[in-house]
Amino acid sequence: MADFDQELDASGLNCPLPILRAKKTLNAMASGQVLHIVATDPGSVKDFDAFAKQTGNELTESREEGGKFHFLIKKS
Amino acid sequence: MEQKKLAIIATKGSLDWAYPPFILASTASALGYETQIFFTFYGLQLLKKKLALEVTPLGNPGMPMPMGMEKWFPVLGMTLPGMQGMMTAMMKKKMKDKGVASIEELRDLCLEAEVKLIACQMTVDLFDMDKTDFIADLEYAGAAAFFEFAGESDICLYI
């Protein structure tokens, strides 16, 4: 597991809440910092990919582990 | 890159149809869109301070029902007093169980993200609606004002 600066547990939340919570958390972070998000919504895999592409924040990791989805997003 | 714009017209006032405008607007904001929602006719119900949105299977054969009720329960039964309230309560519980946000929560997220909410003045007049029943963060305007923003938008949705 790579290093991260902040963690967001979006387990149990459904679309679009994981994205909205992530955006809100990123807003309070500094450029270059990394946010680790944990989600259970299978739709979040494509959504975080699309979120990263459209906002310019880099999705450095996206993986499934033990039924949960883990994402690392580096704030642009 | 210039900021993208999303314009939505929200025309429906039921619990299920309250979701698309608020989900899309809040998500668009998170993606960096400037977003406006123009609420007209029954869509004005989505702007009440105290939301009393309900859902009905009547006239909606596509609505999945608990316990496969749509297979054996006569449609006429749905017209009985209390049925709509019961269906609404069941839908709300299901949404909560599945981690789906409430309309209040999504609306708050939209306001927080500075989505501009515009109420149709004509509808307010038509139905003698009381503006004090609506949330404060609103603008009241008409069709021409909508086009000022919609004409510049990248995406325009009628819901």
Image: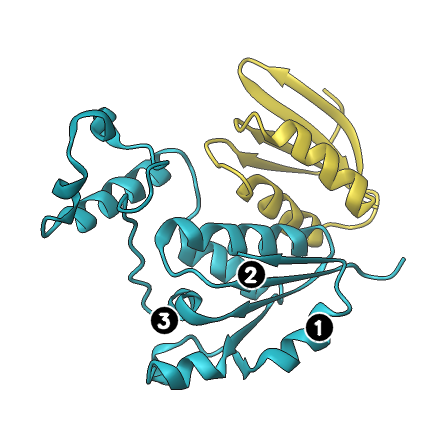
Chain colours: A yellow, B cyan
- For label 1, the SS is helix
Q: Tell how many labels.
A: 3
Q: Quadrant of residue B153?
A: bottom right
Front-most of B153 and B74? B74
Between discs 1 and 3, the one toward the N terminus: 3
Q: Tell which of A55 and A29 is nearer to you.
A: A55
In the image, residue A47 sits, relative to residue B143, either above or below, namely above
Q: Nearer the viewer, mark 1 or mark 3?
A: 1
- Residue B49 is marked as 3
Q: Nearer the viewer, mark 1 or mark 2?
A: 1
Q: Quadrant location of the N terminus of chain B? A: bottom right
Q: Which mark is residue B149?
A: 1
Q: Callout 3 environment at 10 Å: few (<14), some (14 to 19), or many (20+)? A: few
User: What subunit carries mark 2?
Assistant: B
Q: Position of residue B91 (x, y in %)?
A: 30, 41
- Residue placed under numbered mark 2 in the picture: B110
Residue B25, how many percent across, how many down? 60, 56
SS category of the residue bearing label 2: helix
Give the residue type at disc 3. Lys
Q: Residue at x 34, y 80 (%)?
A: B127
Q: Chain of mark 3?
A: B
Q: Residue furthest right?
A: B1
Tell me the CA gap for discs 1 and 2: 17 Å
